[in-house]
Amino acid sequence: MTANTSQTTAITYRGGIVESTHRAHIAVVNADGNMLHAFNDPHRLTLVRSAAKPAQALAVIETGALERFGFDDSDLALMCGSNSSEARHIERTRAMLAKVGVDEPAMRCGGHAPLSDAVWRDWIRRGFEPTAVCSNCSGKHVGMLAAARAMGAPVEDYHEAGHPLQQRVKHTVAEVCDLPDDGVQWGIDGCNLPTPAFPLDRLARLYAKLAQAVDSNEHDNARTQALARIYRAMTSHPEMVAGEQRFCTTLMRAFNGDLVGKVGADGSYAIGVRRSALKNAHQAIGLAVKVEDGNVTALYAIVTALLRQLGIGTPEQLAALRTYDKPPIRNTMGVETGYLEVRGDLLAP
């Protein structure tokens, strides 16, 4: 029996045998929200997880928290990131807590194994036990503590859905995605904060707005300027958005300000591309991908293939992503046993 690949986006092979298939949904839109390309269901209701962090950070910025507590763009990048719990991330989190004047127990996230294998090996060797400041979402939590304080709201229970800060965040996320408040559904994320679900094309729309804002002449539009600041913070400090040997950091370093990208847990990814990085384009564009089975290896391969098929990036920039493009599968002895391959034209109607 052969696999039905009519809706398959990527296939994992072992010894030339199909081992697993990965179905993805893709939306590519311009800054006005017009659909340019779609694959499978571009309107799929999607829990975008950490790919929503720039929108959540926008709500924090609009409370005035950055100015009140003296946060810089590196702090903002950490708020938007899913960090690797490297020493610099933990130290930055502690410094941010000190600026706000709260202690680590105020954070309503828990410690967990790091997203970096190198960090994990180091922790095991040292017998290190992670706490809240080691969370990959530490920047988002400190940012929200700061925002609650800037609003004059209690810092206790800042993570609860009914807290005034979270009500503000929910409205901001819906608004920046051009949805009514009830057009966004909410669950609880792995880090204990509310996490939004909305149509995939609206995630692409959010990132198109980020990329459009950085080249905007609307200097008197506070929201546009806030979105531009988020874009600049993430692209100027990609090491704070993820970490060494992580896709987000590698991608944004390679493209040197031409695009912003962010992963979300369980197989979602979004990219905003400036119009200056596009051929014959008058607007920025946004890309959003969701892999049904949450496979991150497939996700990064699909995102890389999508960039190539859209003609985004120089050969040198795309070469920096080569390890994600057609990744080999190795066993515990380092023997290559298979590979993952993206199938077909992702831009086909």
Image (cartoon, rainbow, N blue to C red):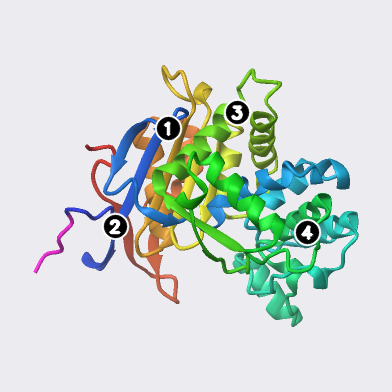
Q: Amino acid at mark 2?
A: Arg
For label 4, the SS is: helix
Q: Compare marks 4 and 1 and give the one earlier in the sequence.
A: 1
Q: Is residue 168 left or right of residue 203?
A: right
Of badges 2 and 4, the one in the foreground is: 4
* View extreme (left): residue: 1
Q: Amino acid at mark 1?
A: Gly
Specify whether residue 4 is painted magenta.
yes
Q: Earlier in the sequence, mark 3 or mark 1?
A: 1
Spatial distance from mark 2 to mark 3, Cα to Cα?
32 Å
Question: Which stretch did the figure color magenta?
Answer: 1-5
State yes or no: discs 3 and 1 in contact (Cβ < 8 Å).
Answer: no
Residue position marked by numbered label 4 in the rendering:
145
Res 214 visible: yes
Identify the residue at image location x=64%, y=67%: 118
Report which residue position mark 2 lands on. 23
Label 3 vs 4, first from the N-terminus: 4
Q: Nearer the viewer, mark 2 or mark 3?
A: 3
Q: Earlier in the sequence, mark 2 or mark 3?
A: 2
Quadrant in which the C terminus is drawn: top left
Please, what secondary structure does the residue beneath circle 3 have? helix
Q: Nearer the viewer, mark 3 or mark 4?
A: 4
Mark 2 vs mark 4: which is more N-terminal?
2
Q: Closest to the observer: 250 or 169?
A: 169
Task: Please give the label number shown on residue 213.
Answer: 3
Residue that sits furthest to the bottom in the current view: 127
The residue indicated by pointer 1 is 33
What secondary structure is the stretch in magenta mostly built from?
Answer: loop
Q: Tell me the amino acid under the disc marked 3.
A: Ala
